């Protein structure tokens, strides 16, 4: 295109035509850019940090904290109310007395569970009351408790009021292989448990990392990472899955009302069975996409990889109203 510096003004109609041509040309260019960007080979390869297993940490401290010796003042930044009062309760329960543990919890509690090589249960419960005054925070603190009757542990909280009220954080170190059941409107994170694990966390998020036994989870949102086990995941919203080995040993079933995403290591060999409502609900960016077979199962669409019918180890994925996405980790 040649641009003249000295050019006579165009007539009104010519100006309109020229503007229209420019708009059309720009639209074509923009659509080409969008089309090219949508063909990126692996748009979902970046895994978020929900699969990173970090050591559990419990911060059970009053707010504002006492000043260090020799300090006259310091600045703190908090999005919550100014005062917090805390209490740390601890229990050590021998495995022979409590062979299995059931946890029932009210809302605004957070549970962290780690499987460790020991013959007893170690429980630390941080009760925290928060308020606009120290007296208000203390009054909320009194209404938060951990109680045990036999193998049943209850976490009570009568003031789930958001910024002002109470909350509890349970950190549990569990003997390897011991059965654990969690039930409540809560958030749960579990690491390295090899025994039977049953979690019902409706209203919260369940993060299950490297747990290898019987796993049965129902929650709003589920993040699961592992390489073996008999695993059943049912989410009211979304499920994210990371497979840690090319061969998953056992059975993994995931059913979500909304989206399911599964990330596989390169060269994954585990047979995969996917059910969706519409063909466009199945999205594959994995390195085995060329080997996917498409079929119908009643009113649903079925996509399979590997010998599903004769597989002892397999992965089954189902979304009720959204996409199932398969990708390979880079």
Image (cartoon, helix red, strand yellow):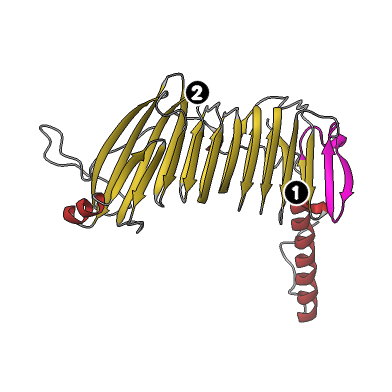
Q: Callout 1: few (<14), some (14-19), or many (20+) C-alpha neighbours within 10 Å? A: few
Residue at screen point 46% across, 29% down: 114
Quarter location, residue 69: top left
- Secondary structure of the residue carrying tag 1 is helix
| Residue 180 sits inside the magenta stretch | no
Q: Report whether residue 243 is seen.
A: no
Q: Is residue 132 above or below residue 123?
A: below
Q: Is residue 260 above or below residue 312?
A: below
Q: CA distance from mark 2 to mark 1?
A: 46 Å
Q: Which mark's residue is nearer the viewer, 2 or 1?
A: 2
Q: Callout 2: few (<14), some (14-19), or many (20+) C-alpha neighbours within 10 Å? A: some
Q: Is residue 231 above or below residue 33?
A: above
- The spot of residue 188 in percent (x, y) is 48, 41
For mark 2, what is the residue? 176
Give the residue at the far bottom of this rendering: 12
* 8 and 94: which is toward the camera: 94
Say which quadrant the C terminus sits in. top right
Say which quadrant the N terminus sits in. bottom right
- The spot of residue 2 in percent (x, y) is 79, 57
With 118 as the anchor, is 196 left or right in this view? right
- The spot of residue 131 in percent (x, y) is 24, 55
* 281 and 154: which is toward the camera: 154
Q: Is residue 283 above or below residue 321?
A: above
| Residue 286 sits inside the magenta stretch | yes
- The spot of residue 269 in percent (x, y) is 78, 26
For mark 1, what is the residue? 38
Q: Are marks 2 and 1 in contact (CB under 8 Å)?
A: no
- Nearer the N terminus, badge 2 or badge 1? 1
- Give the magenta range: 285-308
With 87 as the anchor, is 58 left or right in this view? right
């Amino acid at each position: 295109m040649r641009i003249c510096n000295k050019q006579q003004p165009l007539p009104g109609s010519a100006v309109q035509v020229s503007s229209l041509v420019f708009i059309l040309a720009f639209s074509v260019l923009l659509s080409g850019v969008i089309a090219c960007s949508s063909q990126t080979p692996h748009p979902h390869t970046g895994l978020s940090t929900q699969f990173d297993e970090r050591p559990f940490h419990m911060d059970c401290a009053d707010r504002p904290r006492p000043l260090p010796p020799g300090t006259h003042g310091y600045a703190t930044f908090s999005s919550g109310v100014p005062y917090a009062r805390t209490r740390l309760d601890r229990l050590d329960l021998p495995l022979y007395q409590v062979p299995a543990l059931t946890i029932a919890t009210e809302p605004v509690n957070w549970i962290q569970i780690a499987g460790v090589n020991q013959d007893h249960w170690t429980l630390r419960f941080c009760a925290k009351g928060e308020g606009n005054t120290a007296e208000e925070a203390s009054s909320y603190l009194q209404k938060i408790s951990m109680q045990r009757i036999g193998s049943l542990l209850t976490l009570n909280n009568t003031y789930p009021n958001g910024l002002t009220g109470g909350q509890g954080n349970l950190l549990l170190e569990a003997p390897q292989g011991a059965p654990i059941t969690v039930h409540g409107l809560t958030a749960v994170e579990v690491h390295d448990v090899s025994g039977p694990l049953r979690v019902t966390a409706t209203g919260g998020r369940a993060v299950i990392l490297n747990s290898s036994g019987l796993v049965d989870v129902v929650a709003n949102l589920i993040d699961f990472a592992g390489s073996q086990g008999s695993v059943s995941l049912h989410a009211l919203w979304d499920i994210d899955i990371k497979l840690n080995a090319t061969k998953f040993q056992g059975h993994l079933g995931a059913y979500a009302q909304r989206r399911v995403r599964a990330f596989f290591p390169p060269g994954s060999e585990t047979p995969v069975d996917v059910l969706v409502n519409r063909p466009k609900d199945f999205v594959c960016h994995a390195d085995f996409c060329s080997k996917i077979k498409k079929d119908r199962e009643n009113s649903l669409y079925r996509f399979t990889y590997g010998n599903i019918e004769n597989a002892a180890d397999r992965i089954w994925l189902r979304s009720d109203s959204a996409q199932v996405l398969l990708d390979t980790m880079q």
